[in-house]
Amino acid sequence: MPWIIGLLALYLLLLLVVAWISIRPPRLPVYISPGVFDAPQEEIAIPYKGRWLRGWWVEGGPNVAVFAHGYLMNRAELTPVAVKLWKEGMSSLLIDFHGHGRSARGKVTMGLQEREDVRAAVQFARSRKNGKLVLIGSSMGSAASALAMA
């Protein structure tokens, strides 16, 4: 009987470790940037609620695409799409959600809190350009974008 309690305790401990890692995932390095494709790239930092969101601004035309990456990723994930749009004459803003890439630490909530990051990115993009704005997200970034604009 004591071994069953021990196994149950070990199982619960494992669940707690998995939960902890899920909301505070390891950060992947930023492995590619728009500059690699000769696109103009500006490092930006957006202050928001006492933390900093890091990203890249790619200067193009009057319209802007705001990119929101997926879980366990960073702004590099959607860089090829941003470069393609830049070649078509569109500006882009690629951000790292809090807890990802080079942005401030924070709990990952699969879109619930990340929607505030998207809103801050949209405000930043609107401060730079008056044209049309489109949100492009991948996985968690899509959820955060949908929640931000709901």
Image (cartoon, rainbow, N blue to C red):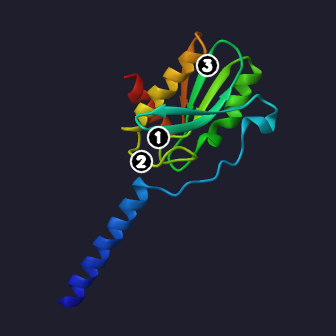
Q: How far is disc 3 from disc 1 in space, using C-alphas?
A: 20 Å
Which residue, given by chain and number where applicable, does mark 2 sit on? 108
Relative placement, left or right, of 69 versus 91 is: left
Whether the residues at callouts 2 and 1 have beta carbons within 8 Å, the answer is: yes
In this orientation, which residue lies closer to the viewer: 150 or 116?
A: 116
Q: Indicate the position of residue 120 as horizontal and vertical percent values.
A: 47, 27
Tell me if label 3 and label 1 are in contact, CB under 8 Å.
no
Residue 33: percent from the left, percent from the top?
72, 40
First-in-chain label (2 vs 1): 2
Looking at the image, is mark 3 or mark 1 nearer the viewer? 3
Of 87 and 95, the residue lying toward us: 95
Q: Residues within 10 Å of mark 3 (few under 14, many from 20)?
A: many
Instruction: Please identify the quarter of the rendering in which residue 4 is found.
Output: bottom left
Q: Position of residue 35 (x, y in %)?
A: 77, 36
Residue at 65% in and 48% down: 30
Q: Residue at x 42, y 28 (%)?
A: 146
**Residue at the outermost bottom position:** 2
Amino acid identity at mark 1 = Met
Mark 3 / mark 1, whichever is N-terminal:
3
**Mark 2–mark 1 distance (CA, rounded to whole Å):** 10 Å
Local secondary structure at mark 2: loop
Residue located at (57% from left, 38% from top): 54
Say which residue label 3 marks.
64
Which residue type carries mark 2? Val
The kind of secondary structure element at disc 1 is: helix
Disc nearer the start of the sequence (3/2): 3
